[in-house]
Image (cartoon, coloured by chain):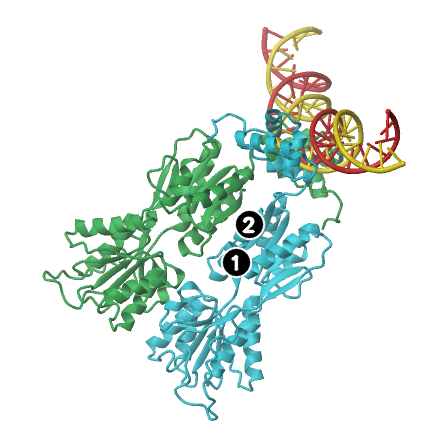
Chain colours: A green, B cyan, C red, D yellow
Amino acid sequence: MDVRGARSPAMTDVAKLAGVSHQTVSRVLNDHPNVREQTRLRVRAAIAELGYRPNRAARALVTGRSQLIGVVAQNSTLYGPASLLAAFEQAAAEAGFAVSVGSVGRLDRESIAGAVERHLDQRVAGLVVIAPVASADDALEDMPADVPLVTIDGNPLRPHSLVTVDQAAGARLAVECLLAAGHRTVWHVSGPPDWYDAAGRIEGWRAALEAAGAEVPPTVAGEWSAASGYDAGRMLARMPEVTAVFTANDHQALGLLRALSEHGRRVPHDVSVVGFDDVPEAAYFIPPLTTVRPAFAEVAQAGLDSLLTQLADPDAPPERIVIAPSLVERSSVAPPAVRPVAPRPREPERRPVEQ
Amino acid sequence: MDVRGARSPAMTDVAKLAGVSHQTVSRVLNDHPNVREQTRLRVRAAIAELGYRPNRAARALVTGRSQLIGVVAQNSTLYGPASLLAAFEQAAAEAGFAVSVGSVGRLDRESIAGAVERHLDQRVAGLVVIAPVASADDALEDMPADVPLVTIDGNPLRPHSLVTVDQAAGARLAVECLLAAGHRTVWHVSGPPDWYDAAGRIEGWRAALEAAGAEVPPTVAGEWSAASGYDAGRMLARMPEVTAVFTANDHQALGLLRALSEHGRRVPHDVSVVGFDDVPEAAYFIPPLTTVRPAFAEVAQAGLDSLLTQLADPDAPPERIVIAPSLVERSSVAPPAVRPVAPRPREPERRPVEQ
DNA sequence: GCAGGCATTGTTAGCGATAACAAGGCGACC
DNA sequence: GGTCGCCTTGTTATCGCTAACAATGCCTGC
């Protein structure tokens, strides 16, 4: 396309060709109102003819703002964060922003601070931190105040803008679905408790049990991995009183399902299971998994909108946006084999919340 | 940290504080040799005191090169591409480069061209296209020649630098493992045939069968999804002569496992299965899945290295780097229940290729 | 002791855009 | 008809940095 070595055309080249000053070209590019239609067309033609492309670095230099949004995310292939990231890129691209990704190995203070530094070096216009862990809070403490910031899935108590999935509500959906099926109580294999996602799900699980007057068993602490679900499952499988389990994510549920199957406990006949995330494969677990679906695309869009708001008006008050998840019912939930003392009729309620 | 409105310090501020010219500051920043040690220290101190951060836009403006690498990837949460992307970001960050991601919904000509345009707008120093589909080729045709480009997982026949996983070798590992277990032949549930990954795996599967003198059954065409694996499984489960299946990825294998289980065909007793990708959950499928592990981190690193080579020397010849995958053996492979006519002793060969 | 060379530092000129101000042309209003 | 003011366009300064060249000082060698 371009001949190597041939400097790509600058604004003055366009100006010369169109017979105007470079400033007029700038006005056309930025859609200033006071340009004669005829001039505008002439400039546009010159731009097209030269294949002119404005130099963002020069623009950023003089305006002090780039069209770059920095995203700090954990270098992970965890389904949740990955989906969020992809959705955000998509939304930002549509709004004309480029997205610079700063992957971090772990979400601790140093790593995040480092990634943020790198982004500030790039003079990003705004910053999005996908910070689902408490350890990220420290890093956010000493965040420069002069760059718009939106946290996704972070500490709900932080003073800046935040978008998050209503983890507790999701957990409630899961628990209520299991209770409605007739289970006496619901066990919970949790995520790492320093993750807000995990904490919110624990909280929602506990609240839903208490609201229903059900006994609250101890949580089984896990990681997000299938391995931890498997470990939890080997323990729970030996406890005959366990008839319903809510796992903090779908991968744990996968491990749990395998452990239960190895111990001869059938799902959903002996034990009902509900997961969280609705990974694409969840429908093909054995059995297909009932799970909570967070609306990643909505979260990403809300995050971008919030950031753009701050970009437009730096004094805009911080927003706190909570996105409600929905329940996807499949066949991993059934009434308990041994009916509880006061049996309730099973009310499947196919779609308690579907949005 | 910064008071709003207070312009962040520029090079001249540092120069003033250190009592030198701004050019000396520039020299310190760029590690020029001819700076007195004492001066260097004074400048460093001033930089630290002011919290000075060089303005990349200004640097990019004058040098004509940014420290940004553009990555074009499909907006997908497919495990392979997502892992590749994460690994690449990591490697680039270590090399001091920021990564701007251009997600595309589909890998067709228009989408890719659009994403590339956006990156060129940002004046990226180099471009990485994760282009595992044939449809991406058109877009790469009319790529500007003056920006370094590396394709990952693209058409092996393209003239520019390319890094790819040796799909065929991976497939051979899978097939050989199954044949070594005593199976007469191996069926294949393929990926979308317009993906090079899928094509390479088909080719390797076929070659391995032919090399062993085994019959080559028709491929079962699938997508990458668990759903397609399930569909394929429902068909294969009804065919008693099918004792070994190699799926193009692990998610398909998951769906296949479920279909087989529903039809009462036990894995690995009745049917052996090998997948591809080694997703983290593969160890927790029922049964744990033997699968091929592509070395994503290596691919990403090789891609970056190749790009940096081109950056350093624009006339460097294009490279073609092929990364060999390895086989991870778990328990989804066993000798067939019905021995073939000429039974071979089972040779597990724990780690045929492990690197 | 002085010329030559190297190490070190400073000065000046851009890179390519936007911002601020200036200036010319035209119609409108008094 | 003259002045005011808007529309339109041009001129100049500036953003923060690096490249190229200039200038200084010190050491070396004859």
Q: Is residue A239 visible?
A: yes
Badge 1 element: helix
Side of C25 where A265 appears, left or right: left
Q: How many numbered marks are there? A: 2
Label 2 crowd (10 A; few <14 / some 14-19 / many >=20): few
Q: What x and y, as percent, mark residue A178?
A: 22, 59
Seen at 41% across and 85% down, the residue is: B336
Q: What x and y, as percent, mark residue A346?
A: 18, 62
On screen, residue B100 above or below B338: above
Residue type of the residue flagged with mark 1:
Leu
Side of A17 where A153 appears, left or right: left
Q: Earlier in the sequence, mark 1 or mark 2?
A: 1
Seen at 20% across and 66% down, the residue is: A239
Seen at 27% across and 51% down, the residue is: A202
On screen, residue A318 above or below A324: above
The residue nearer to you, when weighing A199 against B261, is: A199
In which chain is the residue bearing label 1?
B
* Label 1–label 2 contact, CB within 8 A: no
The residue nearer to you, when weighing A243 against A282, is: A243
Q: What x and y, as percent, mark residue B237?
A: 39, 79
On screen, residue A288 above or below A292: below
Mark 2 sits on what residue? B94
Res. B84 mark: 1
